[in-house]
Image (cartoon, grey):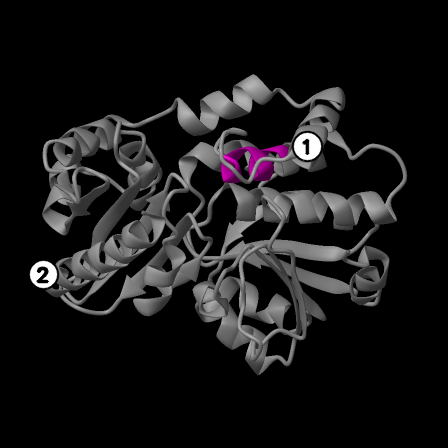
Amino acid sequence: MIDWKHINNYIDNAKSILLTMHENPDGDGLGSATAMYYYLKEIKKDCRILNVSSLPVEYNFLNKDNIIETYKSDIHDSWISSVDLAIIFDVGDYKRIRDLKTRIKENNIKTLNIDHHPHPKDHPFTYNIVDLKAASTGDMVYDYIKSVRNGKISKLMAEGIYTAVMTDTGCFRYSNTNTHCHDIAIECIEVGVNTTNIYQLIYESSSQSRILLLGNILRNIHYELDGEFAWFVVDKNMMSSAKASKADVEGFSDFVRTIRGVEVSMMIMQIDESSCRLNFRSTGKYIINGVAVELGGGGHKFASGAVIHDSLESVVNNSVEIMKKSLLQQRSELT
């Protein structure tokens, strides 16, 4: 059990607090940060949410008060120099906060990591709070707020918490969904969160570019190992042709995984001529984060990823073979 009241001492002693999460933020990181922001403002803390990536359009509803800022050195460095504590949510890997990591180090800012992803023992955080059993980082933020605040969470806090829990449990469908997730959702509904509206804003607002790109991907899926492994490539030409953005690609790995017979899906997305981003998803039959670690990334057993600095052709050949080898080995162990 995490002693949240003890951890509250770190927050209570800080006058100015920076909130951030990994680049290309998702619902868990953004929802956790916004919920914490509204709590910290309630107790009169000077705090700001800064992220190294722009806010995905589907999460604009969390930014009704313009509280989520995209980090810019000339605008934010002066304020960062006065920060006492940086709270980092759902980061998975500290390097994923990019330039903010450098600013934090330069200013000797203490760091509090709140995450449900594994981190190495030699992690760089001042305080490292990890719960691998938590369905989302939002669960952990909810538990913290409930331990230090009386009564139900506010509606503004709840909108962030619900977004975090819903997105990281696949709308309460994934195997990480537990009774605590549903208890949190119930309280969010009780304080007035419009859960239908949040679902529609996140999952039912695809751009025409996204649909065009998805159509191209579906025509070019590769099936391996009797159809249990499906992988696809998103290269720069495909993105340019569809006039798509990075946000348009989110969720494609999950979608391909829903194809009947597919147990593992892998997306290989070209970032530039010398780097690619990989996403892995598993239905639960096969564990895939070992492959992610081997390729320099990490994540959960059934949802993980990596960034590889190599050409697209090399990444495709290498990652497909490594995944096939892992799945074949696990398949032999299952029989």
Is 210 in front, or is 2?
2
**Extreme-front residue of the structure:** 335
Magenta residue check for 163: yes
For residue 179, the mark is 1
User: Which residue was labeled with disc 2?
Assistant: 313
Q: Amino acid at mark 2?
A: Glu
Residue 275: x %, y % from top left: 22, 64
Residue for point 64% across, 55% down: 48
**Extreme-right residue of the structure:** 150
In the image, taking residue 178 as reference, residue 84 lies left or right, namely right
Residue 268: x %, y % from top left: 22, 52
Magenta-tinted stretch:
162-169
**Number of other residues with Cα within 10 Å of mark 2, as a class: few under 14, some 14 to 19, many 20 or more:** few
Residue 319: x %, y % from top left: 21, 60
The main secondary structure of the magenta stretch is helix
Is 166 in front, or is 66?
166
Callout 1 secondary element: helix
Q: Using the rendered view, name the quadrant where residue 321 is placed.
A: bottom left
Magenta residue check for 183: no
Residue 203: x %, y % from top left: 42, 26
Q: Using the rendered view, name the quadrant where residue 282 is placed.
A: top left
Of label 1 and label 2, which has the lower sequence position?
Answer: 1
In the image, taking residue 324 as reference, residue 145 lies left or right, namely right
Is 9 in front, or is 60?
9
